[in-house]
């Protein structure tokens, strides 16, 4: 990165456009990786919170590498303007409902697949949709792309709570899912593992915990509560966060790690954050005294990201920068997605 780029990276984005540019800016390692990767890339479920900037990062990295590659985003595109935005970024789009089996026949062949489709919020109230989206849908993807590399998003929720004195759950730990969302996400993993083993589909399963940017994420949830004087539940006393740009880059890098049997990789930040300390730091900047409730418990949902860092690179964005940027954005009244993470939930209900 040159000096001008470094200066821009240290400055908090002032607009949504600046934020999305930053979140989609490829790393040098990713540019090199995509230079070596053959073929087009399709993002299934591009319409989620991470999908647009991930697809744009893939486009920018491929262009920087001098690779002529189609980047294709698939979604229902229920959000107004998203399809047009992706098109402006030179990303092809296909509008379809992936739960419709006939829709898969219309999707183009692609040797590289990033699987982002899933259902979390509403999982408790609509369990049948949750199971269909999180367990059945992956089987359709695997049947459609048996010879492709598939990097599929999962979640650290499959692990369950661990002592806060530990580094967090590791990839080899036995899953202990709690609630319909975590159970069905483990079901997604099992379907991917089955097809990877029986059809030799090279697959990487990415257990993410938790991506954050300035419009949503755990840090946004905490900052908003501090600003508004709402009680912050301390029961989930510690969390992991990773800047969305870093998570995007790691997910795309994982295409080179796909294997059969499927490889599991945690995508998590390098630090274990204490919720109370984060809130107090934000409170100082916002001029507000945080309000807390409950007691800090000795177990939390935490992931050990060290194996992922060794394979995909250590996330470069520091905890201090994420906290400072988030606080500034909230203080300035920057636009938000109004999609709370419910990170404090310990019963698996979302």
Image (cartoon, rainbow, N blue to C red):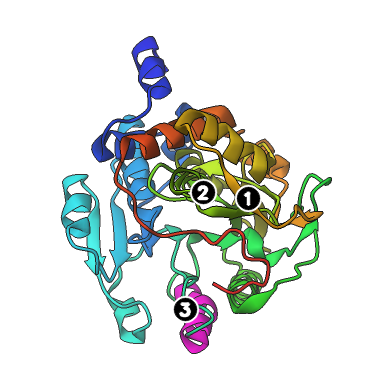
Q: CA distance from mark 3 to mark 2?
A: 21 Å
Residue at 48% in and 62% down = 148
Answer left or right for 229 relative to 263: left
Q: What's the magenta bit mostly, secondary-structure-wise?
A: helix
Q: Nearer the viewer, mark 3 or mark 2?
A: 2
Q: Nearer the viewer, mark 2 or mark 1?
A: 1
Q: Dot 2, crowdedness within 10 Å: few (<14), some or many (≥20)?
A: many
Circle number at residue 133: 3
Label 3 residue SS? helix
Upstream in sequence: badge 3 or badge 1: 3
Seen from the viewer's position, the closer of residues 27 and 297 is 297
Answer left or right for 216 relative to 159: left
Residue 67 appears in view:
no
Upstream in sequence: badge 2 or badge 1: 2
Seen from the viewer's position, the closer of residues 97 and 283 is 283
Q: Residue 198 at what x, y percent from top left? A: 64, 75
Q: Dot 1, crowdedness within 10 Å: few (<14), some or many (≥20)?
A: some
Residue on which disc 2 sits: 211
Upstream in sequence: badge 3 or badge 2: 3
CB-based contact (under 8 Å), mark 2 and mark 1:
no
Q: Residue 28 at what x, y percent from top left? A: 46, 27
Magenta segment, which residues?
A: 126-143
Quadrant in the picture for the C terminus? bottom right
Residue on which disc 1 sits: 292
């Amino acid at each position: 990165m040159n000096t001008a780029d470094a200066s821009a990276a240290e400055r908090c984005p002032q607009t949504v456009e600046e934020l999305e540019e930053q979140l989609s800016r490829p790393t040098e390692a990713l540019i090199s990786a995509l230079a070596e990767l053959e073929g087009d890339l399709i993002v299934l479920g591009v319409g989620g919170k991470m999908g647009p900037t991930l697809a744009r990062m893939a486009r920018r990295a491929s262009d920087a590498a001098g690779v002529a590659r189609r980047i294709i985003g698939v979604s229902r595109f229920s959000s107004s303007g998203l399809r047009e935005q992706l098109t402006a970024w030179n990303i092809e789009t296909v509008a379809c409902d992936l739960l419709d089996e006939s829709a898969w026949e219309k999707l183009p062949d692609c040797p590289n697949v990033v699987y982002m489709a899933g259902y979390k919020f509403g999982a408790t109230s609509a369990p049948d949709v949750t199971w269909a989206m999180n367990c059945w849908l992956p089987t359709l993807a695997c049947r459609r792309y048996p010879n492709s590399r598939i990097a599929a998003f999962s979640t650290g929720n499959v692990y369950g709570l661990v002592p806060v004195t530990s580094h967090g759950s590791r990839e080899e730990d036995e899953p202990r899912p709690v609630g319909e969302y975590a159970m069905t996400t483990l079901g997604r993993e099992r379907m991917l593992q089955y097809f990877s083993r029986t059809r030799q589909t090279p697959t990487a399963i990415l257990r993410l915990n938790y991506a954050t940017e300035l419009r949503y994420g755990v840090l946004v949830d905490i900052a908003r509560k501090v600003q508004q004087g709402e009680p912050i539940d301390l029961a989930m006393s510690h969390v992991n966060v990773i800047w969305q740009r870093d998570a995007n880059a790691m997910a795309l890098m994982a295409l080179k790690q796909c294997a059969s049997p499927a490889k599991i990789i945690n995508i998590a930040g390098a630090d274990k954050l204490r919720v109370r300390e984060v809130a107090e730091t934000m409170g100082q900047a916002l001029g507000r005294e945080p309000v807390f409730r409950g007691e800090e418990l000795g177990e939390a949902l935490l992931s050990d990201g060290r194996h992922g860092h060794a394979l995909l690179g250590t996330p470069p964005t520091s905890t201090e920068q994420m906290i400072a940027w988030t606080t500034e954005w909230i203080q300035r009244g920057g636009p938000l997605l109004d999609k709370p993470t419910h990170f404090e939930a310990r019963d698996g209900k979302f």
